[in-house]
């Protein structure tokens, strides 16, 4: 029995003498990560709200024709061809989930809107409701608030001084 105890003592003593793994002490790490995520979602909300506001105020509505439908990475897209008032022809891709009333297929006539300053850029379905326009900015704003709350909750706290 004494031999077994000696063996255990040597093994546990050797384990305690091993150098400890070094850890990085960065107490603000999670807080900074949450603040960066909150800033990302806040900027995304501002950009999408600005784009939607621009389309709502200064968007040009026109008729277009669906020329192609395709799937990329499990997301369906519709290519819509349209002509601007100055005679330029553009083709734009619109994701399937961005349609209020999805087209029937290739050759369908659709009503679209685009910003007058950039007809080849952002193209959306015309006649979308306010809820459709506000969905993405609201979701991004809520995500930003959630990450701000997480940043507040993960900040390092100072130990309180004892009153005694």
Image (cartoon, rainbow, N blue to C red):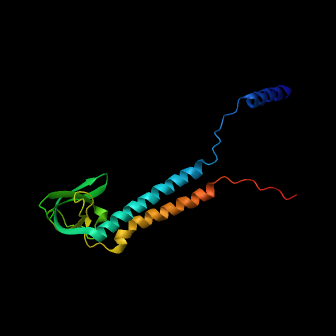
What residue appears at the point 76 percent right and 31 percent down from the top-left corner?
16
**38 on left or right of 46:** right
What residue appears at the point 83 percent right and 25 percent down from the top-left corner?
3
What residue appears at the point 63 percent right and 39 percent down from the top-left corner?
24
User: Which quarter of the image is occupied by the C terminus?
Assistant: bottom right
**40 on left or right of 132:** right
Q: Nearer the viewer, residue 68 or 121?
A: 121
Residue at the far left: name it.
87
**94 on left or right of 43:** left
Q: Can residue 135 be seen in this view?
A: yes
Image x and y of residue 133, in percent: 35, 69
What residue appears at the point 62 percent right and 55 percent down from the top-left corner?
154
Image x and y of residue 69, in percent: 21, 58
Image x and y of residue 15, in percent: 73, 30
Marks counted in the figure total: 0
**98 on left or right of 141:** left
Q: Nearer the viewer, residue 89 or 64?
A: 89
Q: Is residue 65 above or below residue 71?
A: below
Q: In which quarter of the image is residue 62?
A: bottom left
Q: Which of 95 and 24 is in front in this view?
A: 24
User: Which quarter of the image is occupied by the N terminus?
Assistant: top right
Image x and y of residue 21, in percent: 66, 34
Q: Can residue 68 be seen in this view?
A: no
Residue at the far right: name it.
164
């Amino acid at each position: 029995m004494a031999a077994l105890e000696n063996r255990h003592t040597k093994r546990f003593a050797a384990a305690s003498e091993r150098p400890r793994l070094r850890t990085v002490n960065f107490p603000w790490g999670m807080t900074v990560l949450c603040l960066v995520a909150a800033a990302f979602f806040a900027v995304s909300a501002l950009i999408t709200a600005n784009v939607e506001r621009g389309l709502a105020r200064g968007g040009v509505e026109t008729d277009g024709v669906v020329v192609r439908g395709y799937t990329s990475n499990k997301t369906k897209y519709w290519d819509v061809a349209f002509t601007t008032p100055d005679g330029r022809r553009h083709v734009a891709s619109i994701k399937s989930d961005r349609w209020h009333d999805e087209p029937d297929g290739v050759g369908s006539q659709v009503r679209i809107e685009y910003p007058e300053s950039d007809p080849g850029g952002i193209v959306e379905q015309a006649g979308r409701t306010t809820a459709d326009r506000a969905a993405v900015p609201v979701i991004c704003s809520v995500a930003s608030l959630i990450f701000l709350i997480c940043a507040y909750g993960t900040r390092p706290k100072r130990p309180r001084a004892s009153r005694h």
